[in-house]
Structure formats: structure tokens, C-alpha cells
């Protein structure tokens, strides 16, 4: 076919008297098959790991508060919540004191009594700054003296013996109350519920979260706490109390909380990482893998790396056994196919 075309062109040239004829003697370079790229650049950068996440709160169930005193309520101080060591309300002009003991008090106590409830009382009296024997499960003279002081500070007389009717157990040092019925002028009965403690925030979980080998900072409603390494949830009571007390958190309805809240997650400390092509990381197992630095010093030896983040087409890695600043190129492509990441 080529010779036929050549003959036709030649005849045309003869007819017109002159002609320039050129035919390529080989396939044009642009049409030849492209060679495989085997090396890609690598660079060092600072990495904060900042990302937008959704956190789902876990809220405990409401709890009933049971009173121990019977009679007419003559005063009520529950409006701003209850605090351990402070009066909650009065029955027949005698103050009922809120107490946050590790074990709820369930009986009258006097010098010589022993038990887990006595241990809890000793420890709480000590925390409140009253005389006691912290760490002891015995109701001793010091316990009696501390109780007498606490009663006096709340307007009650006492011989040092504990009357259960003078106490109201609460599950934390400070609690808010709801559905409170021990209002002035009402009648109360020992053993009956006088209010509820609304469920509290006990945990924040990163929705579809992936654990990191480093501590990270979680910021929600402008409040920052620590998400521990290898965890996807925060249970730190102090941080959760700050979040729960935040006006923005309180304004979110229950259904929206169940769906999740917006938050920001970032590394607690910035780190230096190596930015490489995603195709340069092979033998990936969880958050680890290998790369092959390309230089005269490395040969073809894989280097173990931790994958700390990524972007479109890029992996951010750290190498414990290698100075990443010395790596400027990494191998990619089929040259990695027969290598083992160990």
C-alpha cells in the first residue's frame, strides 16, 4: 500500500513538473510508548493534623434523689443546685446536708461503728476540711468531732453522732436538680424521691474516628481537651463538665446531640513529616508501611514508616530509623512490587 501511494505521488509530481517528497523512516518519538516513572520527589513539612470531626455525646440517665427526713419543709436552698457539705433544705427547721460520699450513707452512725460507709464519710469530711480519719473505716473520736463541726456550720446541734435524716446523698461534689418537690411548705417522707439529677455528659466519641499514636487536641464550643493516644473517645470528667456547662452546648436539643456535634481535632504538638506520593508507600498494615528512599546511600532498602496523615494522592509519614530531612526522592512504580516491608 505504501509503494502504491508513493507511485501515485510520484506521478503527480511528474505531471506538475516539480515536487518535494518526504516520508518518515521511523515512528515519531511522540508516538512511542512512554517509559514508566520510577522516582518521585519527597519533602519535609510541619504537620498539625487539623481536621473537622463529628463527636457524639454519651449522656447518663436521670437519677432520683431520695430524702431521709420526714415532715414539713421549712426552707429550700436547691435553686442553684446542691453542693456537698452545704444545706439542701430544712425539714421541721433542721437542715438536711448534701453529701457526696463514695458509698451512699444508709444508717445512723456513732463512735465505734465500722464499715465502707464510715470510710466514705471519713474521706469526705477530710475533703471538706473537717476533722476525721481519712482512709479509716472506723467512726472514731475525730470523725465524731468533724461531724459535729459540719452540723454546727449548717445550723444544727449535734453530739457527734450521725443521724441519717440529716443527710441527702448526691453522686458528685456539685449537682443540678430537676423535678424538685422539697419546696417550702410541702410535706416530705423519708425514703421517697424529692427530685432528679438530670443525666450528665459522660463521654464524647469521635464518629467513625480512627485512633492515632499521638495525643490530639479536641476543640468543641471553644473548649479544648485532650484525646489520648490510641483512643477515639474522651472521658475526662473536668473537660466534659466544662462542655456541659457551656451555653452553646445547653442550647442544642437532644436529637441534634444524638446526631453529633461539630468539633476540631488536631495534634497536641506539631510534628515534622515526610511528604511523599501515596504510591511510594507499600506493604501497608494499619498505620504503618514502607518507602524506598532513592539515593546512593540507601540502595534499594525499604524503610519502615508510620503513616500520620494524607491528602489527595499524598501520604504524610514518619520514619523512626531514618532522618527524613535526608530523603529527597522515593521509589514508585513496579520496582516496589517484589519488595517486602518488614
Image (cartoon, rainbow, N blue to C red):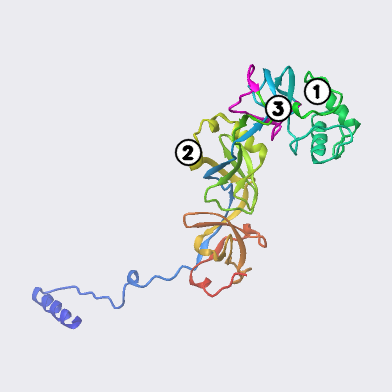
- Location of mark 2 (residue): 255
Magenta stretch bounds: 166-187
- Location of mark 3 (residue): 83
- Give residue 10's position: percent from left, percent from top: 14, 79
Q: Secondary structure at mark 1?
A: helix
Question: Residue at left 88%, top 27%?
Answer: 145
180 or 202: nearer the viewer: 180
Quadrant of the frame with the C terminus: bottom right
- Look at the picture and state if 163 lies above or below 273: above
- Location of mark 1 (residue): 151
Report whether 251 appears left or right of 34. Answer: right
Q: Earlier in the sequence, mark 2 or mark 1?
A: 1
- Give residue 119's position: percent from left, percent from top: 82, 39
- Give residue 46's position: percent from left, percent from top: 59, 49
- Residue at the left extreme of this rendering: 15
Q: Secondary structure at mark 3?
A: strand
The crowding category of the residue bearing disc 2, from other C-alpha atoms within 10 Å (few below 14, some 14 to 19, many at least 20), is few
Amino acid at each position: 500500500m505504501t509503494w502504491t501511494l508513493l507511485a501515485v505521488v510520484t506521478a503527480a509530481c511528474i505531471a506538475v513538473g516539480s515536487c518535494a517528497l518526504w516520508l518518515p523512516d521511523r515512528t515519531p518519538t511522540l508516538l512511542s510508548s512512554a517509559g514508566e516513572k520510577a522516582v518521585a520527589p519527597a519533602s519535609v513539612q510541619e504537620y498539625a493534623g487539623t481536621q473537622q470531626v463529628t463527636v457524639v455525646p454519651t449522656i447518663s440517665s436521670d437519677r432520683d434523689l431520695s430524702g431521709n427526713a420526714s415532715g414539713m419543709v421549712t426552707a429550700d436552698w436547691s435553686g442553684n443546685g446542691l453542693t456537698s457539705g452545704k444545706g439542701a433544705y430544712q425539714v421541721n427547721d433542721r437542715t438536711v446536708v448534701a453529701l457526696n460520699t463514695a458509698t451512699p450513707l444508709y444508717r445512723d452512725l456513732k463512735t465505734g461503728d465500722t464499715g465502707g460507709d464510715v470510710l466514705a464519710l471519713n474521706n469526705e469530711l477530710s475533703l471538706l476540711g473537717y476533722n476525721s480519719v481519712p482512709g479509716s473505716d472506723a467512726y472514731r473520736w475525730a470523725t465524731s468531732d468533724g461531724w459535729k463541726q459540719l452540723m454546727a456550720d449548717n445550723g444544727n446541734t449535734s453530739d457527734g453522732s450521725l443521724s441519717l435524716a440529716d443527710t441527702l446523698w448526691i453522686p458528685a461534689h456539685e449537682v443540678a436538680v430537676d423535678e424538685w418537690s422539697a419546696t417550702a411548705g410541702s410535706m416530705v417522707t423519708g425514703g421517697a424521691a424529692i427530685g432528679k439529677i438530670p443525666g450528665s455528659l459522660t463521654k464524647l466519641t469521635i464518629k467513625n474516628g480512627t485512633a492515632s499514636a499521638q495525643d490530639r487536641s479536641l476543640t468543641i464550643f471553644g473548649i479544648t481537651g485532650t484525646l489520648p493516644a490510641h483512643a477515639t473517645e474522651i472521658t475526662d470528667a473536668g473537660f466534659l463538665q466544662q462542655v456541659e456547662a457551656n451555653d452553646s452546648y445547653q442550647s442544642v436539643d437532644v436529637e441534634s446531640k444524638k446526631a453529633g456535634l461539630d468539633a476540631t481535632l488536631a495534634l497536641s504538638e506539631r510534628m515534622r513529616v515526610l511528604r511523599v506520593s501515596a504510591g511510594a508507600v507499600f506493604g501497608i498494615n494499619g498505620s504503618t508501611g514502607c518507602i524506598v528512599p532513592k539515593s546512593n546511600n540507601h540502595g534499594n532498602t525499604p524503610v519502615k514508616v508510620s503513616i500520620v496523615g494524607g491528602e489527595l494522592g499524598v501520604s504524610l509519614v514518619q520514619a523512626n530509623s531514618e532522618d527524613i530531612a535526608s530523603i529527597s526522592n522515593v521509589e514508585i512504580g513496579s520496582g516496589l512490587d517484589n519488595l517486602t516491608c518488614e
